[in-house]
Image: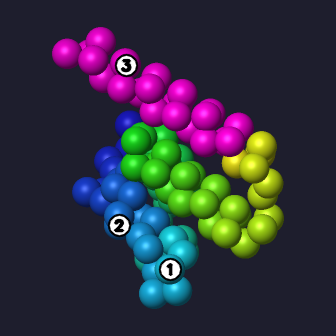
């Protein structure tokens, strides 16, 4: 099995908020890391990843690229995903 670096799956390191107000993958991750795809998937699969997805929905709404019903549907889906992760964590205790 591969030895992953300490930053593996850490959303704030591998997909931080950039100076433009958008999240950006750092060059060291994008071009130098052999684990980038698995790492980003792992980072986006947790509760913080849901927060990022909600940011995207909000930006889409503000830009006029998403309507009320599409926004509601996506927010509901993300809410359900958050609930599912929370229940899984409770079951692990």
Cα separation between marks 1 and 3: 32 Å
Residue 77 or 8: which is nearer the viewer? 77
**Mark 2, residue position:** 13
Q: Main secondary structure of the magenta part?
A: helix
Q: Which residues are magenta?
A: 72-93
The dot on residue 88 is 3
Q: Are marks 3 and 2 in contact (CB under 8 Å)?
A: no
User: Which is more foreground, mark 3 or mark 2?
Assistant: 3
76 within the magenta span: yes
Please state the horizontal and vertical placement of residue 44, each as a whole percent of the image: 49, 48
For disc 1, the marked residue is 21
The label on residue 11 is none
Q: What separation in Å lies between label 3 and label 2 (alpha carbons)?
A: 25 Å
Residue 40 appears in the rendering: no
At 48% across and 41% down in the image, what residue appears?
45
Image quadrant where one finds the C terminus: top left
Q: Give the number of the mark in front: 1 or 3.
A: 1
Earlier residue among tags 3 and 2: 2
N-term mark: 1 or 2: 2
Where does the image place residue 2, in percent across and percent down from the top left? 38, 44
Q: Position of residue 36 (x, y in %)?
A: 51, 59
Q: Residues within 10 Å of mark 3 (few under 14, many from 20)?
A: few
Q: Secondary structure at mark 1?
A: loop
Q: Is residue 28 visible?
A: yes
* Residue 56 left/right relative to 21: right
Using the image, determine if residue 75 lies above or below residue 35: above
Q: Is residue 62 left or right of residue 79?
A: right
Mark 1 or 2: the one toward you:
1
- Residue 92 in magenta stretch: yes
């Amino acid at each position: 099995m591969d030895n992953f670096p300490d930053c593996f799956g850490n959303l704030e390191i591998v997909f931080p908020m950039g100076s433009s107000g958008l999240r950006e993958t750092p060059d060291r991750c994008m071009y130098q890391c052999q684990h980038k795809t698995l790492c980003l998937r792992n980072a986006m699969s947790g509760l913080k990843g849901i927060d990022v997805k909600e940011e995207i929905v909000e930006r889409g709404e503000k830009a006029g690229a998403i309507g009320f019903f599409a926004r509601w549907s996506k927010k509901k889906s993300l809410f359900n995903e958050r609930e599912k992760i929370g229940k899984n964590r409770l079951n692990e205790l």
